[in-house]
Image: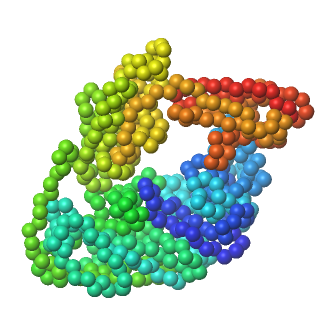
Amino acid sequence: MDYDISLAGNFGEPRPNHFHGGLDISTDNVEGKLIYAIGDGYVSRITQGIDGFGNAVYITHPSGQTSIYCHLKSFSPRIQAALRDYQYAHETNVPDARLSPLVCPVSQGQFIALSGNTGHSTGPHLHLEIHDTETWDMLDPYEFLNDFINDSVPPQAHGLMATPISGEGVFNHDTAKQTFTIGAPQLSQTFTAWGKVGFALWADDYMQGTYHHYGLREMILMLDGHLIFRSVVDRIPVGKNAFVNAWGDYDHWRQTRRWYMKSYIEPGNQLAILSADSLRGIVDFNEERDYHLEYILRDYKGNESHYTFTVHGVREEIPQLEMPIDGQFFHWNQTNSFSYPGEMQLVVPYGLLANDIILQPVVTKQPENISDRYSFYPFSCPLMAEGELMIRARLDNIVSAGILSTEADPSKLYIRSSLGQYMGGDYQDGWVIGRIKELGYAYALDYDDEPPTISLVSNSQSDMLRLHVSDRQSGVASYRGTIDGQFVVFNPQEKTSQVICNLRESPIRKTGKAHQLQFTATDHRNNVQTFETSIIY
């Protein structure tokens, strides 16, 4: 940018199911600011509406990194032309152009786009990410922009959480998780503990001149002068994003929208940014004495804050862990499965859990439907990656329910979540087999033999040809448009069900005469609809 950088968000902030992968750079809450390349390289990818980035430009640099500029309002004319050329050359409506180094080279400081508010953005800003080009690990853009960012304000802690390990510890004579307000660098509360206890901190970083708050770059926990836990949020593999739910207390966030980040490592947490002692950062209060603990918080600039507290080791009996009725343990260090024989089976492979959980399955009988409805946890419980769900289909119920008057087509079956989400799935020998990542939703089978709907929105004599394309069940999977038999690009319009063809960028010559438009849309269950009309252009 050509003005002072102010951050609305920093790298590694915890979010549900992912870390914030870059810096959110303020654009004064307006769109249309000039965006420049941060280094020499070439435009390697241009996307629209993918990964929540809205309009995005990827620049690959010879130093081994790729920078990504997201939520853009529009691209520079040269980059916009490269996107259109790619789409027409490959006859694809998907706005995802992968370019070779010679197509669109750029220099440091070269204009590439205007800032905007597209994609999963709640206000105008630039989201900047930097990845290792070879591994695609997310890197902290602060490392590359350090000289342009002013920050002399240290991080600040707001709350302390103590979590006794189930069946192995108590804190303040209780086995429940407890939180305490931090109002000063030295906590004055009287704490007691016996056995194993993990601690977590709710804290934010700050910068001068703004009310925004940010995630912590570094957190250290010391016990009696010895380091037992350290986190440094500097490099995160994209495939490990979901482990943020294991480092942060996801259940507490679900209820309060506050992230307490643990200063201990769950046994199945695979984040390399965390390190700890042999007890994984858990404190074992096994002596009747005072234990002195200290948190050290640092930001990228080295601004530092300290918080201390004392816990008295007081011997007492530790209650044993009780398993809920109808519960079943899923262990973090093995592949787990659960089934209602002949009706449903859930498989959670090794590596998808960071800690043991107690599954609490519920089946809702729906004898008149294609399948019963299944849930596995009483509230949100995301996996680290997708597990496998198999549900038996009652094909006879498809016809008897009046969905069809002829024999059912199993290829039209799919899994739907309790939020109405299309979850896909393949039919095999009476079963629909799909993938799920959330145990807290309920799942059942649905059937889709209805094609998408298509209608003309814009005036048939306009340069911008707009169509409304929707599908109320499995959703639109793909579409293709031609005019007079020639392929034309239709791009999705931001946050609507409309697709747009800019006829001025198409191979169709403007003659003022009638042209024949044919547009075909296909949903995720391969139902096809074709729309034809004449347009004047």
- Quadrant, the C terminus: top right
Q: Quadrant of the N terminus?
A: bottom right
Q: Is residue 213 above or below residue 396?
A: below
Whether residue 301 appears in this view of the structure is: yes
Residue 107 visible in the snapshot = no
**Which one is nearer the viewer's eye here, 282 or 399?**
399
Number of marks in the rendered image: 0
Residue drawn at (74%, 50%) of the image: 80
Q: Residue at x 63, y 64 (%)?
A: 125
- Where's residue 114, x and y in %? 72, 60
Residue positioned 47% across, 40% down in the render: 421
Q: Is residue 404 left or right of residue 297?
A: right
Q: Position of residue 193 (x, y in %)?
A: 17, 74
Image coordinates for residue 207, horizontal then vertical, percent: 54, 79
Residue 199: image quadrant is: bottom left
Q: Relative to 137, is 520 on the left or the right?
A: right
Name which quarter of the figure residue 507 lies in: top right
In the foreground, 459 or 72: 459
Q: Residue furthest top?
A: 406
Which residue does the image show at 50% across and 61% down from the upper left?
A: 20
Q: Position of residue 333 (x, y in %)?
A: 25, 50
